[in-house]
Amino acid sequence: MSPDPPAVYRRVLLKLSGEALMGRQEFGISQDILASLSDELSEIHSMGVELALVVGGGNFFRGAAGNSEGMDRVTADHMGMLATLINSLALQDVLERRGLVTRVLSALEIRQVAEPFLRRRALRHLERGRIIILAAGTGNPYFTTDSAAALRAMEIKADVLLKATKVDGIYTADPVKDPTATQLKQVKYLEVLEKGLKVMDSTAISLCMDNKLPIVVFNIKKPGNIRRIICGEEVGSTVSE
């Protein structure tokens, strides 16, 4: 069996949705999903790639949903941030059971379970070969975990932002609802904003555009996709200049 080609990215930020951790469940975390994801991340880490993870909390609570039901937006968003911390701890547990060294860094201070996010500390962990899991979004209400992923990617000087989804990339419409939707392999930042394509929120896209950070949108359900992207294969859709 021939070895993998060398990694084309040195430092990567992977954005996972909370829903991606549910698997076929309607709520919570699937241990099978965690196991397959951690196996792939372990393989990528062994290639010398520095990994940072940002995970959402939609499998437990979504701030926007709470707000739509009459809850105070700030309170709802803080509850959503705590949901991301639950997912981050679950990821940490399964990765460390595979012998990897990880650190959870939280934008909200909960020192009993996570380090507070400090940029220099995050960079030092990456340089020492640790996987960092960045929890609680930006620590501020009204900002999504997509925006947090874009912000953290800039702060740690990631080479690329990988956005894991349930479909194969960016489409002209929702491929689940519209069978005529076609996939767009290469998309410009302005095209995403002007056409309202469902990639990431406009704050995240604008931040990546201003700093020329490429975004690769791919299907997390297909095993090996992350490794293929890391090795330079054309997978999913790319947002760039």
Image (cartoon, grey):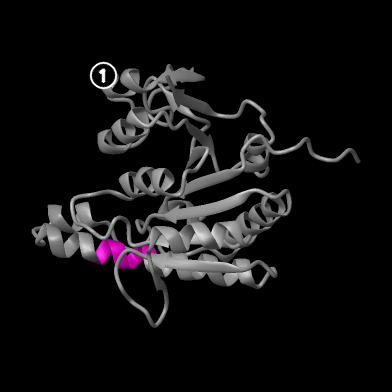
Estimate the x, y position of residue 226 in percent, counting from the top left. 62, 42
Q: State whether residue 126 is above or below residue 221.
A: below
Tell me: 131 left or right of 62. Answer: right
- Magenta region includes residue 100: no
Name the residue located 68 percent from the left edge and 57 percent from the top edge: 42
Q: Nearer the viewer, residue 150 or 94?
A: 150
Q: Nearer the viewer, residue 30 or 112?
A: 112
Name the residue located 42 percent from the left edge and 50 percent from the top edge: 17
Circle 1 SS class? helix
Amino acid type shown at disc 1: Glu
Tell me: 170 left or right of 196. Answer: right
Q: To which residue does mark 1 refer?
A: 194
Tell me: 78 left or right of 51. Answer: left
Estimate the x, y position of residue 210 in percent, counting from the top left. 33, 29
Specify start and end residues of the magenta stretch as a single range. 79-84
Q: Main secondary structure of the magenta part?
A: helix
Residue 206, quarter of the rendered image: top left
Residue 76, quarter of the rendered image: bottom left
Name the residue located 53 percent from the left edge and 65 percent from the top edge: 91
Q: State whether residue 186 is above or below residue 10.
A: above
Tell me: 239 left or right of 131. Answer: left
- Magenta region includes residue 80: yes
Name the residue located 70 percent from the left edge and 50 percent from the top edge: 48
